[in-house]
Image (cartoon, rainbow, N blue to C red):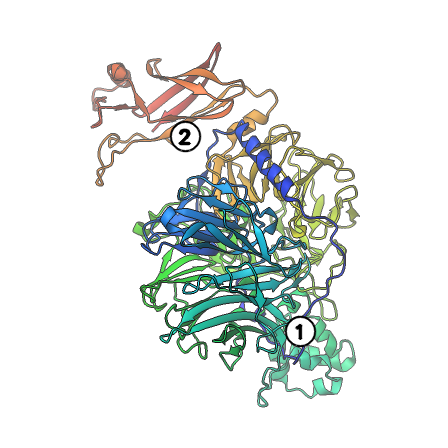
Amino acid sequence: MKFFPLLLLCSLFLPGTCVSAQTDGPRSQSATPATVRSQAYQQRQQLQSNSPAAGLAFTNIGPSIMSGRVADVAVDPADPTHFYVGYASGGLWETKDNGITFHPLFDDQAVMTIGAIDVHWPSKTIYVGTGEVNSSRSSYAGNGLYKSSNGGKSWTHLGLDETHHIGRVIVDPKNANTVWVAALGHLYTTNPERGVFRTTDGGKTWAKTLFVDDKTGAVDLIRDPRKPNELFAATWERQRWAWDFQESGPGSGIHHSKDGGITWTRISSEKAGFPTGEGAGRIGLAISYDGSDKRHLYASIDNYFRYDKPVDPTDETLTKNQLRSMTKEGFLALKPYQIDEFLRGNGFPRSLTTDAVRSKIEKGEVTTAQLVEYLEDANSLLFDKPVKGFELYHSISDGKNWTRTHEDYLDGIYYTYGYYFGDIAVHPADPSTVYAMGVPIVKSTDGGKTWKGINGDNVHADHHYLWINPARPDHLINGNDGGINISYDGGKNWRKCNNPPLGQFYAVAVDNHPDGYRVYGGLQDNGTWRGPGSYEASPGWMQEGEYPYKALFGGDGMQVQVDPRDNETVYVGFQFGNYYRLNPKENTTKPITPKHELGQRPYRWNWQSPILISPHQPDIFYLGSNYLHRSFNRGDDFSIISPDLTAGGKKGDVAYGTLTTIDESPLQFGLLYTGSDDGRINRSKDAGASWQRIDAGLPQNLWVSRVEASHHYTNVVYATLNGYRNDDFSSYVYRSEDAGQTWTKIGNDLPAEAVNVIVEDDTTPNLLFVGTDHGLYFSLDGGNSFAALHNGLPAVAVHDLVIQPTTKDLIVGTHGRSLYKANVALLQTAASAGPALTLLPPTRLRYSGRYGSQGFDFTTIEPSVSFQVYHPGAAAGATLRITSKGGTTLFTQKIDLIPGINAIPYDLSFDLAQASALETELNKNRKEDQKPITVKAAENDKFYLRPGKYTAELTVGDESVKAEFEVK
C-alpha cells in the first residue's frame, strides 16, 4: 500500500464536513454463496486427486527477501521464540526458533487468506479466522473459522463461512472451547453474517451477540485480562465497490460487554467525546492498567471528517483550491515562481512552461479551473481528501468520557488510507507507552501526547500488528507488509525474519539471456525485481553476502516487459500507469507515461495498468489507460490509437473505467485486443484504425482479467473475467474461434474460483493454463476439461503465468508465496495428438570425484536427478534400464507408474558388477600417452556414472521408449 510522496495530501481542508464519494449504479452480480464455495473446494480436491500431472513437481524460486503482508501473530507466553504468523495471502506459518525458520501449516485448506489467529497454549489448540480485514485490492475472502487440536497437523472447519473477513479471534485461556470472533463481513456486498460471534462448545454452535447492520462488522475485539468477563469490540461501517470505497459511517463505534460477550452496550458517542457519524472510520482498541490498578482504554480511529488546516500567511505555495475560483487577473498577478512550482510539483509536462501557461490563460485558451481539472481523477479523490486521519482517544471511565491524547493532527500516520491499518498496542502495565501502526510505526511514552517513529532501516512500511512481551516489554514482534521484525530494545533496533518466500506478485516475465534466463516480477508494495530462473529459495545467500534477486524499481511493482533483443531493456512501473524504460546494465531510467493535453480530462489509469511489447517489432510498445496508447520508439512518445475503450468510468475514489489487459496476435500484426475493469472487450483488426466491441454474449460488468490471442490460430482468442469485486467467485473462462464475434464457455469443470489469467502454450494449441485465486489448472484438450497442478504448489492465488520458450519452464507468479517453476515439456507432449509413453532424461549432468564422500559439514555429497515420464495408460509396473554407449546394462530398477506424469529419482549410481565392464569400455580407445580411466567405488561404496553418453530405456508391458543423455 505504499505510495510515493508526490501523491500524498496537499489540499486545503474544509471544516465540519465529511468526505463521501458517489456510488452510482447497482451491482450486477450477486455474492457466491458459501455452499457453492464449499462445493468448489471439493471440486478442486477432485481435480487434484485425478490429475494426470500429479507427478509434476513445482519448485519455489523465491524471492523471500521482501517477505509478505502480515495479518496477525500469536506468541507462546511460555516461550516467545515460538509463535505463529498469519499472512494476508500466504497462509499460516510456525516458528520455534525465533524466526530463524518457519514452516507452513495451512497450505491445503479451502482458503489461505488469514485474518486473525489465537492459541489455547496448554492444549495446543489453534483457532484461525480466515480473510484479512484490511479491505485492500487483494484482501481475499475467507470462509470462516478453523480449529486444530494438534498444533496445526490437521484442521476442522467450524463454520461462519459467510463472514468472509475476520478481524480478531480470542480463545479463553482457561477453556479452549470458549471463543469470541470479530467478523467484518463481505467486502463488496452487504450481508448479515457480521459482528461478534461467541461459542462455548468449541465451534459446534455459534451465537451472534453483537450486530449493527448489514454493512457494519466487527473489526477489533479485546478482552480485559484482569476482568475476563469484560470485552470491548470495535465495529466498522465500510462498503467497497470497484469504483469507490466508503471507508466510514455511523455504524463505526465501540461496544462494551460485562457478561462475557453475551450482551453489549455502545460506549462511543459524540456526547462522550468520541467521533461518530459519517466520518467515523476504522477503530483499533487496547487496554492497560496503571500502578493503582486503574484501567486505561485506548481507541484509535481513522477519522474521515475534514478540518481546517492552519494556513501560513507567509506561504506563497499555490494550491488547487486557490485556483478553482481564481480569476484570470488573479492568476496573471501571480509571481512566476509560484506558477512554476505548481506546474512542476504536480507533474505537468515540461512543455507547459510558466510562460506558455500564462499565455494560454491570458488568451482565454484555458481557464484556471482547467488547470485543476487537468489533475483531477479518481486518484485525486483518494489522495487529496483533506481528512483528519489517525487519532488516538483515551478513557479511564470505561468509555463514559473520551479525550483525544494529542493536540496536533497526525495525518502522516494513515494519510488517506487508514482503512488499511487500525492496530494499536499499549504496554500492559504502563499506560503511557503506546504504539500505533500505520504507514510508519510510531511510539509514544507520554500516553499519546507526542510521538516518534521507530521504523528501522530494515523495517518495511505499512504496519498491521505488534506484540509486546508482558514479561519483557522492550521485546516486540512487529508484523508489516514486509513480514516479521523483532526488537529487544523497544524499537530502537530490529531484526528482520524474511526466510519464507511470501512475495505478493502482480505480474511476471522472463527473458532469454544466453547465460541463463532471468525472471522478473512486480510485487505489492515491494517494487520490481529480477533474479535467475535457476534459483531455489534458501537462506544460503546470507553466507554468500549477495542476494540473487536484484531490485529494479520501487513503489508497488506492476507489469513488466523485457526487450527480447538485448534482454536488458526493461519496462517497469508503479501504480496508476507510472511506467519507465530502464536498462540496469547501462544504469539508465526514462519515464515514458504519456500525459494528456491541457484542457483535456486526465487519462484513467488502472492500479495495474497493462503494457505490451509488440511480438512483431520490439520498438512498438503499447500502454493502456482508458485509451490504448502506442509508441513506435520504445515509449519516447505515444499516440492514442483508440476511442475510450471502457464504459466511461464512474465517480468515486477508486480508478475505474480503465483498461486491464492488452494483447496482440503473434500471428498478425495489428490484430489487437483490450479488456477493461468494467467488462468491455474490444478488438481492432487494422492496428487501431477502427475498433469493434466484442463482449456481446459474455457476462457483463465484470473485470476482464485477461485476453489472450492464440499462438496458433489467427481467429482464436481467450478471455477470462473476474467477479472478485462483486464477491462473485465463479470461474469465467471463454474461447472464441472467430476473433471475438462469438464466445464459448470453456473450463466447465473448473471450481468456482475467481480467474486471474489464462495462457495458451506456444508450442501446443491444446495445452492451456489457468490461474485462479486458489491455484493453478491445465487442460490438455483446449479447455474441454481441466485438471489441477498442485505438487509442491500451495492453494495460493495465482496472478500471472509465463512460459520460458527455450527451457519449457512454466513460471507461476503467486500473490502470497512468490514464484514457482515447473518444466512442462511432458505436458506439451501429452497435449499433442495421440499422447504416447514418453521419457525425458535429466539434463546438465556432471561427474564429480567427490560423489559419495563427506563434505566439510559431514554430509554425504550425492547427486539427485530424475527422469520424467508421461504414462498415458492406467497404473502399471515398469522397468528402467540404463546402458552405456557400448551396450552394457549398468543399472536396472523396477518402478510403479501412475497415470500421467511421473518423476523417477536417480542418483547416477550403477551396479557394482558392471564396474569392470564399464572401465574396459571407457579405456577401449585410449591412446598410450593417456592416463587410464579407473572406475572405483566412492567412499559410500557406490559406483557413479563417469563422463560419457548413455541410454535410458523404460519398458511398460510390451512397450518401450528410449532417451539418450550425457554426463560431462
Check the image and report above or below for 198 versus 857.
below
Task: Report x, y in % for residue 909.
Answer: 30, 23
Task: Report x, y in % for residue 77.
Answer: 35, 56
Tell me, for residue 18, which label it has, or none: 1
Relative to the observer, which residue lies in front, 150 or 11? 150
Report the label total: 2
Relative to the observer, which residue lies in front, 131 or 583? 131
Check the image and report above or below for 760 versus 75.
above
SS under mark 1: loop
Horizontal placement of 339 versus 229: left or right? right
- Residue that protrudes farthest toward the bottom in the picture: 313
Quadrant location, the C terminus: top left
Disc 1 crowd, CA 10 A, few/some/many (<14, 14-19, 20+): many
Q: Could you say which quadrant of the image residue 578 lies in?
A: bottom right
Quadrant location, the N terminus: bottom right
Q: Residue at x 78, y 39 (%)?
A: 741
